[in-house]
Image: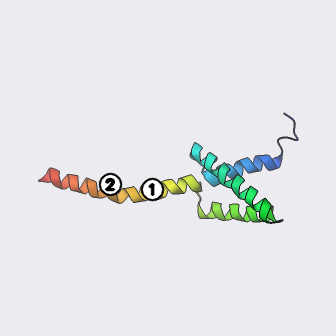
Amino acid sequence: MFPDSLGISLSVDALVMVLLGGVETVSGAVIGAIVFKAANIWLVSQTDLSKLVLGGFIVLMVVAFPKGIVGTLETIRNRWRSPEKKSALATSRVEVAE
């Protein structure tokens, strides 16, 4: 391994991929890498200011989704499941009381 092949920019890219996807899960790093590389490739083909736009996009994503993409999706999924579980639990309690 040579120092040229593993520079600061590659290290920062890896960190951004993990932060973007979500730190708490392995799937978050994979999703973050896919989103980051797709956005990077698309922006390079669209504009000369791709690094600036990508940096702004990353800042917005981290501010909007502090738990990452996967963490936010899990939070949303848990919120949707909560009312169903609560109503099922209340129904079972009523049946037991009777």
Q: Tell me which amino acid carries mark 1.
A: Arg
Camera-side residue of 11 and 40: 40
The spot of residue 81 in percent (x, y) is 38, 56
Camera-side residue of 43 and 3: 43
Q: Which mark is residue 77?
A: 1
Q: Tell me which amino acid carries mark 2.
A: Lys
Q: Is residue 48 left or right of residue 61?
A: right
Q: Is residue 54 left or right of residue 60?
A: right
Marks 1 and 2, Cα distance to the nearest angstrom?
12 Å
Circle 1 Cα neighbour tier, 10 Å, few/some/many (<14 / 14–19 / ≥20): few
Q: Determine the residue positioned at 78% across, 65% down.
A: 46
Q: Secondary structure at mark 1?
A: helix
In the rendered view, tell whether residue 31 sits above or below residue 80. above
Q: Quadrant of the N terminus?
A: top right
Q: Which mark is residue 85?
A: 2
Q: Determine the residue positioned at 62% across, 52% down.
A: 21
Q: Is residue 48 left or right of residue 25?
A: right
Q: Secondary structure at mark 2?
A: helix
The spot of residue 96 in percent (x, y) is 16, 50
The spot of residue 50 in percent (x, y) is 79, 63
Q: Is residue 19 visible?
A: no
Q: Determine the residue positioned at 59% across, 55% down.
A: 68
